[in-house]
Image: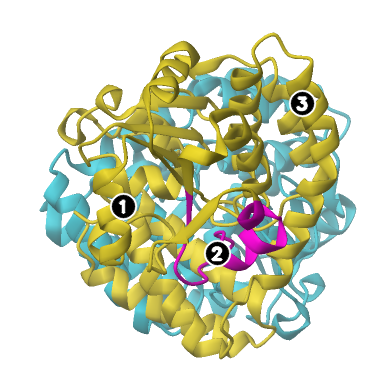
Chain colours: A cyan, B yellow
Amino acid sequence: MKTYLDCVPCLVRQALDSSRMLTDDETVWEQVVRETLRRAATMDFALPPPAMAQQIHRMIRTLVDDRDHYRSRKEEFNAFAMKLVPQARAWIKRSDDPLETALRLAIAGNVIDLGVKSRLDEEEIQGSVQRALSDRLDGDAGQFAEAVAAAADVLYLADNAGEIVFDRLLIEQIGPGRTTVVVRGAPTINDATMADAEMTGLTGAVEVIDNGSDAPGTILEDCSPEFRDRFERADLVLSKGQGNYETLSGVAGNIFFLLQAKCPLIARHLDCPVGAMVVRRAAAVPAEEASQVPRALGK
Amino acid sequence: MKTYLDCVPCLVRQALDSSRMLTDDETVWEQVVRETLRRAATMDFALPPPAMAQQIHRMIRTLVDDRDHYRSRKEEFNAFAMKLVPQARAWIKRSDDPLETALRLAIAGNVIDLGVKSRLDEEEIQGSVQRALSDRLDGDAGQFAEAVAAAADVLYLADNAGEIVFDRLLIEQIGPGRTTVVVRGAPTINDATMADAEMTGLTGAVEVIDNGSDAPGTILEDCSPEFRDRFERADLVLSKGQGNYETLSGVAGNIFFLLQAKCPLIARHLDCPVGAMVVRRAAAVPAEEASQVPRALGK
């Protein structure tokens, strides 16, 4: 997905929000905003928004001199999500369709996204999880189940910390033995890294690798050769969240996108309402050129 | 009021919205966004937001090659507001306090602001007018009445087209003989110019001058010497709307600010809720240095 003009003010706002979250130094906030504006003025809008976000967050890291600014927040989200696991496991266990229930919970976990919202309260996560059990799925859970049943080698692209706790529940249904989870290669915003996989016990339950990149998405050209090779060989790729969708929506392959469409532009690109719980096979994603951004969007 | 960091993404969004309203040429939209980013990267944040907006709208005018892009929309708003006049006059006539009722209606008219919102529907204006009769005023209408009674020479700084129709009703209560209305010196967004004063019959009812500037506010240094002289000599200045507030909030003088606080930063600066109908004497406006922008603002 390209960067739409509507994404630009949002990227500037996110840069400001991030700088405020990471430091109390107002001069740094101003530096971040000015530098974001300067870079955005010449950015290639054909690239997906996470390419710009990657640049912005690298720049913020150099200005606030810290390697993993969101570490404590990510730990907080992991810990909170883990508290919900016993209840979630009980729902899956007594469900008529445990795979679909686990799928719903994994998509619900995608509400944990600091790239979209600076604040997130626990009630919101709990509400999202609860609603996920009964809300309409935008996509075909049966088709998803068939694709999973047919795959010998599943690559599961994780998105955020906290969220990966719910991903684990879905992976338990898919089969940890044939699944490999992928986390980011280096910290960026609240995206899950190996530290989160370790903290939440994911590394003990399933193979976890990293993609070698610090983009908040999966920019294949920016990933390690090892990951790219793994991506090519996988029978089935499960791509979680908006950042992975934005960067992989134009990539050919047996890919399912699992996400909550939180941004109006992504919802438009997917032709679904904002807030929809999306389960889409890559082929069913509208082509880049078919998507029209409405004049009045976001007004 | 200075330009807060939170104003920056909003200015970019407004530039994009304006370009979309004025042309269907997507390459122009992109030019406007890139040029806005480039200028914003080096702008002086000590200046008020309308100083930047002035630059942006001059730039948009050069790109779309038209002198008064909002003319037809302004005429539409003028015409719509004029349809509401008989009802408004009836309310004023049967009111126990005609001056306060006219004041409320003039503030209600300030909802007509394309700088803040790209779309505005007639129901919203009607609703705003209706609510204005009973909603709490944020300020002291009695103090306002005293200031008006004591002034021999009132300078009334108009804001938007459409809105000036309601301003006229207030001026009729203040006394057209001692009032001079000021419009912008050249078109900018939907701000009222002499053409709007003529279309709505204001020029036949009261003296109308222009300020010699194309800023969507009153940047004194950018105004004509004639206007500045008039501003200095006035007993009482009535300043309508956000743009005039942003540019005059730090100026000494016997000024009353009449506006709807539509933006969260302006509401914060005025220490009032978003949406408040504000009547404030300049001295009661918090000093620039006293206002703190909250970390979580707008999130």
Image quadrant occupied by the C terminus of chain A: bottom right
Point out the frontmost of discs 1 and 2.
1
Q: Secondary structure at mark 3?
A: helix
Residue visible at 75% across and 81% down in the picture: A287
Q: Chain of mark 2?
A: B
Residue indicated by mark 1 = B230
10 Å crowding of disc 2: few (<14), some (14-19), many (20+): many
Amino acid type of the residue that numbered disc 3 sits on in the rendered structure: Gln
Residue under label 3, please give it.
B130
Q: Secondary structure at mark 1?
A: helix
Asked whether B181 or B105 is in front, the reply is B181
> Does the magenta portion include A4?
no
| Sequence-first tag of 1 and 2 | 2
Residue B104 x %, y %: 62, 25
Q: Which portion, as a residue range, is magenta?
A: B181-204
Q: Amino acid at mark 1?
A: Arg
Residues at marks 1 and 3 on the same chain? yes
Q: Position of residue A188 (x, y in %)?
A: 33, 56
> Badge 1 sits on which subunit?
B
Relative to the observer, which residue lies in front, B125 or A229? B125
Does label 2 or label 3 sit earlier along the sequence?
3
Residue A272 at what x, y percent from top left? 80, 56
Secondary element under disc 2, as helix, strand or loop, is: loop
